[in-house]
Image (cartoon, rainbow, N blue to C red):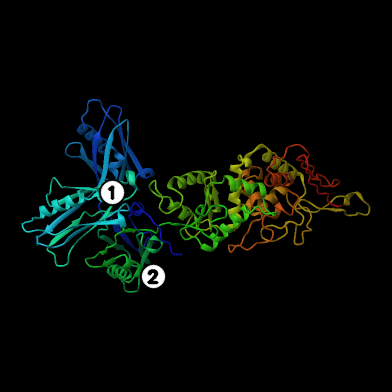
Amino acid sequence: MKLRRAISALGMAFALSFGLMLVPAEAATVTINPRANAVEAGQILAAPDGSVFTITTYNAGLVDGQKSVTHTYVTGDTLRQTANKIVQAINADTDLQAIGVTATLGTGSNYTINSTSTSGTVYKQTTTGGGSNRLAIQQTLTIGGTVTVDDKLTLTIYDAGLVGGKEAVVYKPNTGDTLADIVIRLRNKINNSTSLSALNISAKVSPTDPNTLLIDSPTFDATEKFTSYSAVVKAGGTETMALGDFWGTNGGQTLSISGSVTVGDVVKFNVTNTDLPDLQKEVSYTVQAGDNLNKIRCGLRTAVNNDPDLAAIGVHATCAGGVLDVTTTSSQPTAFLDRALIVCTTVLTSPTQWPAAEKVKYCGSANITNALRMRTTLEEIGANSSTRTAYASDKLKAEGQFSVFLYHNHNEFYDSGQDFPWNFTNGPTKDQVNEIKDVIFPLYGSARRTILGYSTRNKLSLIFENAEDRLDPPGIEYAINHSIQHATAHEMGHQFSALDGDIATGATFTLAWQRDLEGMGFARSCKYNAHAANTEPPQPLVYDGIFTGALAADRTFVCGGDGNGFGGPNPLVVLGTRYPYFSQFNTKPVNELPREELFSEWFAWRAGFPDYIASDGSLRDGSNQVFETSQALSCTFVYINDRFDFGQDPAGGGGYSYPHSDTQTAVFSCSDGSTTVHDNPGT
């Protein structure tokens, strides 16, 4: 599916994550050599008593992707002294030192912040107490060569706030002009432009080089975007125009190829640009017999230059000098990444149905067919039909503000959290990703692979096509045990429980569950002979146990090939080993199973989505039919039905009888004040 999104240059620029390609250890690898980071120009404009200045640095190499440095104004300090103390605070921070962030005091109350990090670095400032601290990204434009009258020099400024997204600043040298004069004329044209001034874009001559122009544009502090530039001298012109080389300007990028050459390996990298289909394009080369590193470089060059999508945005590559050089003439910032972006796409099949269209997305390499299964499942739950859950569906539609995401696996979910506080891929934020990881790993440990979905309390739900986990040993994947439909309904059970007061952990549901467990502990699993020992000659009187006729997930009868087996193991053992949901926790006693999970399984079954086994979504008979075909869990069954259909909280009370000898029949009774469930074997 091809996507075109209106994504700001800000989002794309900060997609950068330079480093080694994730390819097999013995393969040739691509190292993306970083461009220099942008320089931030700062200036303290006001500092009354009570002012507090905070500068936050954003960089993927920092813990949580960011670090804040704060300075409280000292009474009596000048603006220059205040700026200098901010500089000192930045330079004293060991975390910022580790990624190469430094600050320098300039003239007056001006200062600059620079970074040598291999990841993109920018900054935000916040000021309280009446102080004023201006930050701007500073681009350089150096004019060189020799001056020729009437040559045409064009600086194009790209910004979303400009009409048409750009504005050209043009100057033709006059007789007697020097290179420094050209810089001054371009400065004046920028500062005299009402449209550029409205965006706080300004220019000044560098105090250290009269042939260099410093162009300041607002940092993403307020605008959450970047201003980018291109510079061109007309064909045959004798002047040169050199923009500063950082990731906001589409400067040339150098990629190094190193490592072992292994036939059949795929060496690759990604090009990202908002004008590309799906925002990105993979460039790859498969190593051939007889190749060396240079042939791999040139193979990638050819792949770049033969790609029509990359040609459309002006990307071109060369493989001379032992490196792969890539350039672009695109007006949009272009980045080169060591991995693909995890983009989340809205499932737009029924935008008027519940949930709202923008609340249902599939991410990364997830399959569109499974995304449609997820979307359809949600709509069926919300349809409030006679076969489903009226009260629960109304509750979800009326109060549910969460989003539902389908991922191919856990790896892509972990990779989708962004390093910064904006989220241009339309997926969960980095904070949400970390929150879920922090909860799941300590809870489930090595059982992590078995989790095919996760919900937070009325925030979001995640569904996975499989449960592959990056922490697993290589080659080990969990055999899919739940279909997309069932997993989606299961997670909606969690959301309904949260919306309705966390009923999965409520006292009434807990009581019903405990009654079922106690009764099952004494009940017979399969058919049994009650009176054979008391008659002469023996006259077998056969009675049904609670799993008679029930099918396990493997489509075999729990009580034998025809369901007529006698005796059988303890019902609690059967419950923990023969049904998919309970099997996930078969190392735990059944009475320690998480009730939240039990509740969500009940919801999935009650909503009409019994557990599936086949990965293609086809029903496997017997899957979790403990809920339907056995007499077990009768109290829980009554509670769930009443709660889902009517929103009632069934009262406790009533009894739960069970067969505990050969002379008694099995009577299961769980009273909610109006309903009693009975099963009387042998009658």
Q: Are marks 1 and 2 in contact (CB under 8 Å)?
A: no
Residue at the location (6% across, 59% down)?
A: 175
Residue at the image point whose x is 16% and y is 54% from the top: 142
- Tell me: residue 233, above or below residue 494: below
Q: Is residue 165 left or right of residue 576?
A: left
Residue 578, x across and y down, in percent: 67, 54
Graded by Cα atoms within 10 Å as few (under 14), some (14 to 19) or many (20 or more), the crowding at tag 2 reads few
Estimate the x, y position of residue 504 in percent, counting from the top left: 63, 42
Q: Amino acid at mark 2?
A: Gly
Apparent side of residue 389 relative to residue 315 in the rendered image (left or right):
right
The CA span between labels 1 and 2 is 34 Å
In front here: 534 or 518? 518
Could you say which disc has been placed on residue 117 in the image? 1
Helix, strand or loop under label 2: loop
Type of amino acid at the residue the image marks with label 1: Ser
Q: Residue furthest front?
A: 194
Whichever of callouts 1 and 2 sits on the residue coming sooner in the sequence is 1
**Location of mark 2 (residue):** 264
Mark 1 nearby-residue class (10 Å; few <14, some 14–19, many ≥20): many
